[in-house]
Amino acid sequence: MGCPRWSPTWPGGGSSGWDSRSYGGGTHSLVLAATRADGSPALLKVPVLDDENRHEADALRAYAGDGAALLYAADPESGALLMERLEPGTPLMDHPDRGRAIDVACGLLRRLRRPVPADHPFPRVPALVRHWAATLPAGQARHGEPVPARELASVLAAVESLRVPAGLDVLVNRDAHLLNILAAEREPWLLIDPKPLVGEAAFDGGWLLIDLLLRDLSAGQARGLAARVGGGLGVDAGRVRAWALVRSAENVYWDLDQGDDPAVSLALVAALA
């Protein structure tokens, strides 16, 4: 049974209506097919706000539709976003040519890089690295040393190497992967769900590399894919691999904190170390 139409007033004035039809397979947001006041299709996204997605609207404004879904309106209190609806919406993950999919993703991420003003609201990547320097050893101790000693040494060495940024600060995305790039009508492929930070361009490759590795968790595949992603992004492959390694180690302790099985995260650490 459908819910009544709801037409709130967004900041800056104007109203938009939408129906209650669920749209997509979001796991951290309520996503509904929406209709704007002029009858054009849109998407209503109401996220569970956290530190990672709090500035999604700011990132979408910065992109201004150049490689990403358009933002029509946003409610800062609830985090609700009224956005361009991407159709057919097929994720890049489903592309039959994995190599071509990697090229598309890297090209889009390069396009989405942009400088930010000094008064930008985004978290900074160096602060995240400092956080990891403290929390990764603490997680290892808290959970009885789940990461083998040799691999942990590689993780901590990667953290130290990432303390010194490589290149200029740009807008980057901590959640760049093939499920967050969708087929669209306005352009062949557009990004959704950015979780923005400001830091070096190679940061974009870390989560993308993790996502690509899940099909084959081997050291050889990690080396090859890091080179492919680094080349596609125009950054050092070693930096891409370091970002992926540190984030995989973070996920080991996160899994354990949540009572989940860390086997995949541990396998990623082993492949990347």
Image (spheres, grey):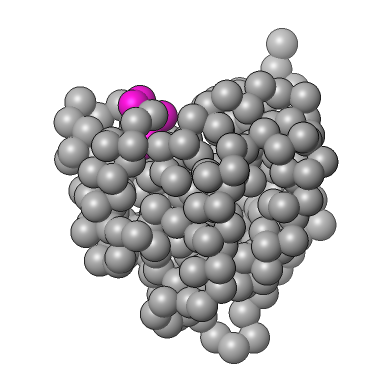
- Magenta stretch, main secondary structure, is loop
Left/right of residue 171 with respect to residue 212 in the rendered view:
right
- The residue at the point 70 percent across, 17 percent down is 2
Outermost residue to the bottom: 118
Front in this rendered view, residue 111 or 89: 111
How many numbered tags mark residues here?
Answer: 0
**Residue 178, quarter of picture:** top left
Q: Is residue 37 above or below residue 268?
A: below
- The residue at the point 36 percent across, 49 percent down is 190
Which range is magenta?
212-216
Front in this rendered view, residue 25 or 178: 178
- The residue at the point 63 percent across, 27 percent down is 262
Percent coordinates x, y for residue 56 in the rendering: 61, 57
Location of the N terminus (image quadrant):
top right
Percent coordinates x, y for residue 226 in the rendering: 30, 49
Percent coordinates x, y for residue 126 in the rendering: 60, 72
Left/right of residue 192 with respect to residue 101 in the rendered view:
right
**Residue 212, quarter of picture:** top left
- Residue 19, visible in the rendered structure: no
- Residue 98, visible in the rendered structure: yes
Percent coordinates x, y for residue 197 in the rendering: 57, 66
